[in-house]
Structure formats: C-alpha cells, structure tokens
Amino acid sequence: MSNSLLFNFTVNKEAKTVFIKREFAAELSLVWDAFTKQEILDQWWAPKPWISKTKYMDFKVGGRRFYAMVSPEGQEHWSIQEYTSISPKTNFKMLNAFADKDENPELPGSDWDLKFSEQNRVTTVSVTIYNESLARMEKMIEMGFKEGFTMTLNILEELLAKLSQR
Amino acid sequence: MRSQVATRMNLRRDIFQAIADPTRRAILVLVAAQSMTAGEIAANFDTARPTVSKHVQILTECELIKAEQSGREIYYSLEIEKMKEIDEWLHQFRKLWETRFNQLDEVLAAMKGQKNEQ
C-alpha cells in the first residue's frame, strides 16, 4: 500500500536546502495530529531501534518541543524545536537545534518548513530544511552526525561533484 | 549486529570530524585535482606549515587521503573509496526519513482503526 505513495528526497545545493516530500494514505487531520501531538510524534519520529522521548511540547508560536533521541544503549541526544509560525492543518515552521540535557541550544540550528495538503484522502507532506549559511551547514555536519541524521551539505556535494569529474 | 552498526557509526564519525574543518576540506579539494606533496599543499595556505601538516596527518589517519612514496617525495592523493562512504551517509540520511515515514504509516493506520471502532 505505502509503496505506491510518493516519496521524494532532494538536496538543493544552491538553495542550501534539503527537501522531503511524502504522501500518506490518511486524511489531513490525522496526519496533522501525528506531526503536532507529542504522544503521537514519539511513536514514529525516531527510526527504530532509536526511541523519541519528548520531555515537553507546547505547540504554539513561540512554544517548543524539547525531546531526545535515545539510542538502544540509552544514550540521549537532545534537540529543541521552536515553533515560529503555525497555520492549522496547512503549515508550520520551526527552528531546530541540538541541545544539551539542560535545554541549552547549540546554535546555529536549521529552519524547517512543513506543508500539508489533502487530495482524495491522500495527504501530502512537504518538509523543507534550510541552512542559511555555509558556516551553519558546517556546524550541522560537525554536530549532527551523532544522531545519525543531519542536514545535507553543500560542501560534500562540491567534493562529490569534483570526484565525479575525475 | 548492533555492535556492527556501532562500529560503522564510529568509522563515519571520524570521517565527518575530519571534513568538518574548512582547511581540511580545502586540502581534500586540492588533492582531488592532483596528487601533491605536503609542501605543495602548504603553499596553498597562509597557515603555518606545521598546522597544514597536522591537517594532512588527520586526513591520512582517517584514510581520506593516502600517502605514496615517489623517489624522495611523498605524494598525497584522494582515497576515492573512503569518499564514497560520505556519499553513503547521504543515503543514510534519506533512509532515516524513509524509515521514519514508514513508521508513521503504521501509526496512521492504527489511528484510523481506532477512529472506526468509535
């Protein structure tokens, strides 16, 4: 069933963005809840065997989700997601940053823009992750890898492009 | 299997620490174009030569570049296979989103089931 649903993953070097688009066989209100309610988010956000553990989540503009990705060995990697804009069931934006367990962010972070739309009971979610500067991209590489998931990067694209020219 | 994953993670972390530094990335780009001696590499930077040597050493230890003796000189060149691991890392990042969203499919299916029971 899910195989017939769209999944796009692209890295745009010029725009310094990672773009992920996915369709879900569910109505918009369910998908929206899955992205915006902590008890549902924690069920799927971490790729198994990792666990997502949300300490608190206040889904409103200026509010935050403070959560950890917990490894099978019990190692916790904390992150902060701060909501900067919310249009119910259409779009929300957040600033994403790694943090320590006391909620001190490791800046800079990245900007996330999530769009939701429904057609014929299929909901499409588009996630755009944006890093404003090269320095920020670099910081992401440095810090992000510990969670095994980070932004993708101009620099590597450049290197790999160079390699392929050989 | 878990330990295998952990080992691979450590391996990659080394690479990513290595390329997190702008000077080291610049060195990689230089030796990607052609193999060079440490002196030739250092000539491209304003940084003190021992500092550049240190960067070269780190890259060599991470096996991102390899050293080859040619006569009296040691030439450094890019280790293509290792760079491919970085490419694979991009793939891992994609994989993460795939996994995450497949899990969401299951959660949504369960939510729909609950809704129908009500």
Image (tube, coloured by chain):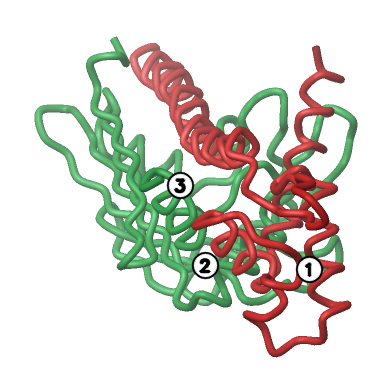
Chain identity of mark 1: A
Which residue occupies the extreme front position in the image? Answer: B71
Which quadrant of the figure has residue A85? bottom left
Q: Examine the rendered structure and indicate whether residue B45 appears above or below residue A124.
A: below
Q: Secondary structure at mark 3?
A: helix
Q: Residue at label 1? A: A103
* Residue lying at the far left of the rendered structure: A120
Instruction: Identify the image quadrant of the C terminus of chain A.
Output: top left
Residue at 40% x, 13% y: name it.
B113
> Residue flagged by tag 2: what amino acid is it?
Ser
- Please state which of residues B83 and A150 is positioned toward the viewer in this rendering: B83
Q: The residue marked by circle 2 belongs to what chain?
A: A
Residue at the disc numbered 3: A163
Q: Which chain is red?
A: B
Q: Which residue is mark 2?
A: A110
Residue drawn 34% across the image and 40% down it: A9
CA gap, disc 1 to disc 2?
Answer: 16 Å
Q: Is residue A93 rendered to the left or right of residue A48?
A: left
Cα separation, mark 3 vs mark 1, equals 40 Å
**Residue A91 in the figure: left or right of residue B91:** left
Which quadrant does the N terminus of chain A fall into?
A: top left
Q: Are marks 1 and 2 in contact (CB under 8 Å)?
A: no
Tell me what residue is drawn at x 42 percent, y 59 percent: A129
> What is the letter of the green chain?
A
Please tell me which residue lies in front, B31 or B96: B31
Give percent across and percent down for residue A144: 67, 55
Chain letter, disc 3 residue: A
Give percent across and percent down for residue A70.
Answer: 78, 39
Q: Secondary structure at mark 1?
A: loop
Q: Residues within 10 Å of mark 2 (few under 14, many from 20)?
A: many
